[in-house]
Amino acid sequence: MKTIALKYLSVALASTLKFFGGPITGVILKLGWIETALCSAAGMMFSVLVLTYLGSGIQELIKKNRKSQPKRFTKTTRLAVNIWQKFGIIGIAFLTPPLFTPLFGPILAVAFRVPRASIFLWMTSSALLWGLAISYIAHKMTFVQEWIK
């Protein structure tokens, strides 16, 4: 019982920083693809939960301790603004696992002043969708498993 809980925790922790880490960890630990998907989604949602509540505080802390003014428009900020203008929170949430990472996506949503309920709804949907898709691919495609080993 302890070992399975540690496997689940490992997959979730791997997904808190970079979402693709969860499915890869699940394959390595020989978990089923649905278990891997759910644990990956849980890991991402842990990051979303923490950063949604601490996001504005983190932004203020960074702003206060920054020595020079940041560039106003970078490739990343332009991309984020374009996605926001075209698709809103749904676009940000959908692209968080593959593009923005579970760390940057929620901070971006907080910066655009999205209500927390919307952040949780769309980020959860996105995490489950991407978790199921990536975990299925990682577990069913043998060349992915060979590449991981």
Image (spheres, rainbow, N blue to C red):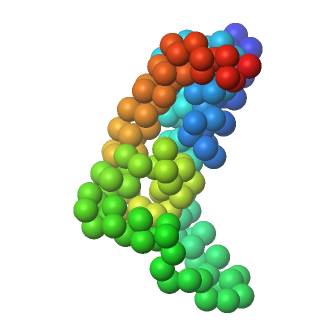
60 and 77: which is toward the camera: 77
Q: Residue furthest bottom?
A: 68
Instruction: Write the residue at 49% across / 21% down.
Output: 137
Quadrant location of the N terminus? top right
Quadrant location of the C terminus? top right
3 and 81: which is toward the camera: 81
Residue 35 shows in the view = no
Instruction: Write the residue at 63% across / 46% down.
Output: 17
Compared with residue 33, is residue 45 higher up or lower down, i.e. above or below?
below
Q: Residue furthest left?
A: 86
Compared with residue 148, is residue 46 higher up or lower down, i.e. above or below?
below
Compared with residue 68, is residue 85 higher up or lower down, i.e. above or below?
above
Instruction: Write the residue at 26% across / 57% down.
Output: 87
Instruction: Give residue 86's position: percent from left, percent from top.
Output: 25, 62
Compared with residue 25, is residue 103 higher up or lower down, i.e. above or below?
below
Instruction: Give residue 41's position: percent from left, percent from top.
Output: 49, 34
Instruction: Write the residue at 55% across / 31% down.
Output: 40
Residue 140 shows in the view = yes
User: Going by the image, does 102 lie left or right of 2?
Assistant: left
